[in-house]
Image (tube, coloured by chain):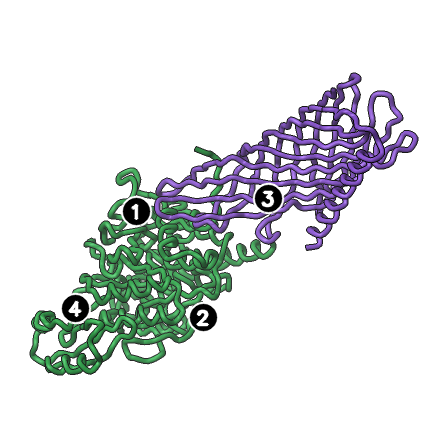
Amino acid sequence: MKKRKLSFIFFIILIFSFSWSFQDFRTHRERELQKPESKERTTHIKLYNQGQPFRYQGPLYAPDQILVKFKPSISEQKIQATIAAYKSKKLRRIPRVNIYQVGIPEGVEVMEMVYVMSQNPDIEYVEPNYIAHITVTPNDPFFKYQYALYNSGQDVGVPGSPQGKNRADIKATGAWEETKGDEEVIIAVLDTGVDLLHPDLAEKIHNSGRDFVNDDFDATDDHSHGTFVAGIAAAETNNQKGIAGVAWNCKILPLKVMDVEGEGLYSWIIDAIVWAADNGAHVINLSLGGEIGIQALEEAVRYAYMKDIVIVAAAGNDGDPVLYPAAYDDYCLAVAATDNRDIRPSWSNFGPEVDVAAPGVGIASTVPTWYWDPGALPYGAGGDGTSFATPHVAGLAALIKSIKPWLEPDDIMDIIRYSADDTNSSQHPGKDELIGHGRLNMEKALVPIKIESSK
Amino acid sequence: MRRRLSLIIVLLFALNLTCHSLSQAQTEEPAQAVKLKPAFGFEYFSRTIKWDDDKYTSKLQSYFFTFNMEFEIQEGFSLGVLLGYSLANNEGMIFRQLPFSVELGDKSIGGYLLGGEIKKSLISQENYEIGLFGQFVYSLGVKNTWDIPGLAVEGTVEGNPSWMRVSVGPVISYQGFDFFSPYLFLNFNRLWGNFKMEETIESLTGSEDKKFTGDGLFCVAVGSIFELAESFELNGEVSLIPRKNGADLGFMFKASYSF
């Protein structure tokens, strides 16, 4: 009891100190903005993408490579010979799923090669190596309150944000009474990497992970998106620093699959999903996606799912159909976004694959220590996108796995779906394509439900 | 383990006494007619129960109505059976093995009751009598279905509890009054049971078979038998089971007629 009171007092002090700093910061920013000549880079504010959710506009797939799956009966020798026959080069083989990343000859069109190779009877399928992208970047530097976890209707500290609605949140505080997670449970964050030295994350990192972009074992974040995502899912909590993570005690396994621009080849993602599945992950967070679904990606996702891993993926931020891998309905939980009034932003992708929604507008989390100018706290507010809704769900999946380790991924996915609050029931009762079953409710998913009435 | 051993010893002791009495009845005394003593009873008890490896506790409150038939085989020795209906309330019991954890509310669950009794007078001196009384009661709850409120889809849990109670020990009674005999019943009192629950929420299913035991092993009961007429008597009893940090209470009322 004493401990709880103490934590509560610390929490309040923390919030006040942040609010105070932010007030100073806002005042300072307003002053700076009034001076046109100091507008460029004299403040700590870095407003990404004009405050809009990030939308990818680059190429759909890598121009010089493809992904090939040979039939299981084909020997390695024959595979090598076949690849050579097409004047192509084996770049690497993704283990377990046995998919070959193949470099094609210069001047040959990817789609042309895909067509030619698909005629080969030894090949099961051949696909372009598509490019996925992060679904959001944060657009404001500081946070005031984490309304996503507990919403009292407060101002979230982002200029222009609407007044929040009381308890339009994921009910984290009530759920933490039941569990704060098990440190044996690992959330693999497949993203731009994670700041391994961040004061609110360093103690939560399972190991330095794997960098599939640079092919080494140091998944340090060179972008910021992955650090932001990891903080939401499992920042160190009750440590008098920064923010609270959804899964207090669970660990983070950083896997870098997106480059400094926030883009990544499907082959990196496929490889990382398989690697996470083979290296102890219990939950995989994919705050990323691509417009095209390919068999190789689906196979990797299925591989992880079959290894009892819960996969949570962002629906996307284009107001379009759900991205891949979130759209692999049988294996992934697809997450849409809501705001601090439980309203779905129009940019949140939609479709029958959407399972649940979670707060993804004006979110506060961790940013890399190098992100702001020296002296600034390594936290940011105002993150928009389904990327930031997704780790709320991944955190909950990790908490469920912590207290009920015997449950299958399907069970955990169902618990998350069925415990959601149908916040748009007045317009769309029941499951719908906008927010699925509804906005996440951690309390209902974790805390025993009192049963009174019988049939 | 120790508790089980003591239960077995007590039961063996009771069995031994019964056999001994029966053999005495057959060898020393001429055969006599078996006296019948039907009775209607009502009992209430509130018992602290422990579950999930004794990590958690809640209360089992039970009311039961019984019909007892006592067969007095010989003077001072009788056997009885009891049948009845019980209402049990396991409020606060939590099922955490189910996909969605649920906590039972205060709704009582009906059940059928079956039991047996043994009563033997051991020593009778002046106005005092020391005897032995043993009873077991088994309650099998009927299956109940509860709605799980607040979910995005419809879901139910279905389950039924069962419990068994064994009490055995000496009864010291004073028979110096004309119409009533107060008594003190010190007994070993063991309660255990299980509650099986099955959860179904669309394709999501799970089940949990929760074992529980009563907290406390010994019971002190005081009561009195009032002889209202030659063949008609009333029996009232209040019991107390001390346990760590408190005690559990119960009471019993029985009206019997002998012929």
> What residue would you read off at disc 1?
A343
Say whether disc 1 or disc 4 marks the residue closer to the N-terminus: 4
Give the chain of mark 1. A
Q: Quadrant of the C terminus of chain A?
A: top left
Give the chain of mark 4. A
Disc 4 versus disc 3: nearer the observer: 3
B232 to the left or right of A229: right
Give the chain of mark 2. A
Place of residue A161 in the rendered image (x, y in percent of width and height, measured from the top left) = 32, 52
Place of residue A215 in the rendered image (x, y in percent of width and height, measured from the top left) = 29, 79
Query: Pointers 2 and 1 in contact (CB under 8 A)?
Result: no
Task: Say whether mark 3 and mark 1 are on the same chain.
Answer: no
Task: Say whether mark 4 and mark 2 are on the same chain.
Answer: yes
Q: Residues within 10 Å of mark 3 (few under 14, many from 20)?
A: some
Residue A111 drawn above or below residue B36? below
Q: CA distance from mark 2 to mark 4?
A: 45 Å
Count of marks placed on residues: 4
Say whether disc 2 or disc 4 marks the residue closer to the N-terminus: 4
Task: Say whether mark 3 and mark 2 are on the same chain.
Answer: no
Place of residue B226 in the rendered image (x, y in percent of width and height, measured from the top left) = 79, 23
Query: Pointers 1 and 3 in contact (CB under 8 A)?
Result: no
Place of residue B222 in the rendered image (x, y in percent of width and height, measured from the top left) = 78, 33
> What residue would you read off at disc 3?
B193
Q: Which residue is at a point 36% across and 64% down the rendered structure image?
A: A307
B198 to the left or right of A134: right
Q: Colour of chain B?
A: purple
In-front residue for pair A377/B122: B122
Disc 2 marks which amino acid? Answer: Pro
Q: Residues within 10 Å of mark 4 (few under 14, many from 20)?
A: many
> What residue would you read off at disc 2?
A199
